[in-house]
């Protein structure tokens, strides 16, 4: 196991009815900005619960944050916060809302010339205004980590940043808030969490059995609970287990002391920027092809994954790896996520433009071994068709 330093200060309130905790978690004298998306929280009673819990607080609202949050939208929120002298931000929604809020609270305090440099140039974030979250879509784990991904349509970019200054002060996870999610979003959340685990687990052995077992436990739980949530949207236990899986998948616990991949995400981001596909849709397309392409370097963990997660123990090495990849692909398909670009109405002749974007963003040495060059990404993308 490699050396590591673990820090995660996020307080979690988990369970039905926990939105009421807002009344004590947010300082009474704070002026609050509530950030959210297209307004679904007003249709599923989450908004009213939030407003009820904020009785006695001064607040204003900022809505319209996109599923792939746009830089321009975030900067409008930054301007509003400065104008209204906001002290605290409350993000209500899924990972996109929380990701946007992370950038917003960092950009408000950014002292450089252009906040885009936080994303494009890795400019240091030295402070941020405080914020909390009410999670309504389990997927990204953004409610308990310090990472964010923001798009800028005019440049065709989808870029990430992270900073310990943008950990949420608290996050409220009420599984009941997920009951009314569209099936597509439930599917995306399950796939997103699954791939997050795989990026941190399916690399090479590091003699870290606790991390491996945690990761395998999350994968097995998603495999068991995912179909239940699709079959019965109001299965509280299934929803609760999926919600906690998504949080645990990317809160920094399972990646301590082990190598990480993240090539699937880097290539997937470019597919989203080019085609507008959902983030999880791109992950379901790319992951099976990356692990197939890198099967030799990932052999030991692929065989472990095959045995421990899918109970595949018979056959030679290649047969077991083939079976594990096919099981992965079949799981995504069963959840409703297509695993080939041909499943979507996209122009695959633009794949060279995606390769160029990877190069422009310096994604030229991806994977746990930094050995996925631009030529390899090109071949992986061709496999995705």
Image (tube, grey):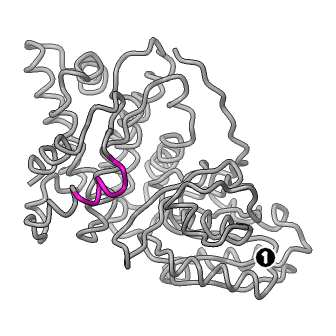
Q: Where on the picture, by quarter, is residue 380?
A: top left
Residue 233 forms part of the magenta stretch: no
Q: Where on the picture, by quarter, is residue 232?
A: bottom left
Q: Which residue appears at 45% of the width and 65% of the height?
A: 179
Asked if one can make out residue 231 in the rendered structure from this viewpoint, the answer is no
Q: Where on the picture, by quarter, is residue 294?
A: top left
Q: Is residue 166 above or below residue 301?
A: below
Q: Position of residue 159 (x, y in %)?
A: 44, 60
Q: Position of residue 256 (x, y in %)?
A: 55, 27
Quadrant location, the C terminus: bottom left
Q: Is residue 133 above or below residue 60?
A: above
Classify residue 355 as left or right of residue 72: left
Q: Which residue appears at 72% of the width and 64% of the height?
A: 131
Q: Is residue 348 above or below residue 10?
A: below
Q: Which residue appears at 40% of the width and 37% of the height?
A: 197
Q: Position of residue 195 (x, y in %)?
A: 35, 43
Q: Main secondary structure of the magenta part?
A: helix
Please, what secondary structure does the residue beneath circle 1 have?
A: loop
Q: Which residue appears at 44% of the width and 54% of the height?
A: 139
Classify residue 186 as left or right of residue 336: right
Q: Position of residue 192 (x, y in %)?
A: 37, 51
Q: Nearer the viewer, residue 9 or 177?
A: 9
Residue that numbered label 1 is attached to: 54
Q: Residues within 10 Å of mark 1 (few under 14, many from 20)?
A: many
Q: Residue furthest right?
A: 29
Q: Which residues are magenta?
A: 356-363
Classify residue 75 as left or right of residue 154: right
């Amino acid at each position: 196991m490699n050396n590591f330093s673990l820090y995660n200060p996020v307080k979690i309130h988990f369970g039905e009815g926990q939105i009421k905790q807002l009344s004590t978690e947010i300082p009474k004298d704070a002026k609050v900005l509530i950030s959210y998306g297209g307004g679904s929280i007003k249709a599923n009673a989450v908004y009213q619960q939030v407003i009820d819990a904020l009785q006695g607080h001064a607040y204003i609202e900022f809505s319209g944050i996109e599923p792939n949050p746009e830089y321009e939208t975030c900067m409008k929120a930054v301007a509003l916060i400065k104008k209204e002298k906001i002290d605290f931000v409350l993000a209500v929604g899924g990972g996109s809302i929380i990701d946007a809020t992370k950038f917003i609270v960092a950009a408000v305090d950014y002292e450089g010339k252009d906040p885009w440099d936080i994303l494009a140039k890795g400019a240091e974030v030295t402070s941020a205004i405080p914020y909390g979250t009410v999670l309504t879509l389990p997927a990204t784990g953004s409610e308990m980590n310090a990472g964010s991904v923001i798009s800028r349509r005019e440049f065709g970019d989808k870029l990430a940043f992270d900073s310990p200054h943008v950990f949420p002060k608290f996050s409220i996870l009420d599984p009941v808030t997920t009951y009314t999610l569209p099936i597509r979003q439930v599917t995306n959340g399950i796939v997103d969490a699954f791939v997050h685990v795989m990026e941190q687990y399916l690399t090479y052995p590091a003699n870290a059995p606790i991390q491996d077992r945690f990761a395998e436990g999350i994968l097995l739980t998603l495999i068991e609970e995912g179909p239940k949530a699709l079959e019965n949207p109001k299965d509280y236990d299934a929803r609760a287990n999926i919600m906690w899986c998504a949080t645990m998948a990317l809160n920094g616990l399972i990646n301590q002391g082990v190598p990480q991949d993240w090539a699937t995400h880097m290539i997937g981001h470019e597919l989203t920027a080019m085609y507008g596909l959902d983030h999880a849709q791109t992950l379901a397309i790319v992951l099976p092809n990356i692990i197939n392409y890198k099967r030799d370097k990932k052999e030991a963990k692929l065989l472990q994954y095959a045995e421990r997660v899918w109970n595949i123990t018979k056959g030679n090495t290649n047969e077991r790896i083939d079976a594990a990849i096919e099981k992965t692909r079949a799981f995504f398909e069963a959840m409703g996520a297509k695993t080939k670009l041909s499943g979507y109405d996209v122009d695959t002749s633009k794949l060279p433009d995606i390769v160029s974007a990877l190069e422009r963003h310096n994604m030229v040495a991806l994977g746990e071994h930094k050995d996925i060059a631009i030529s390899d990404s090109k071949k992986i993308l061709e496999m995705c068709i």
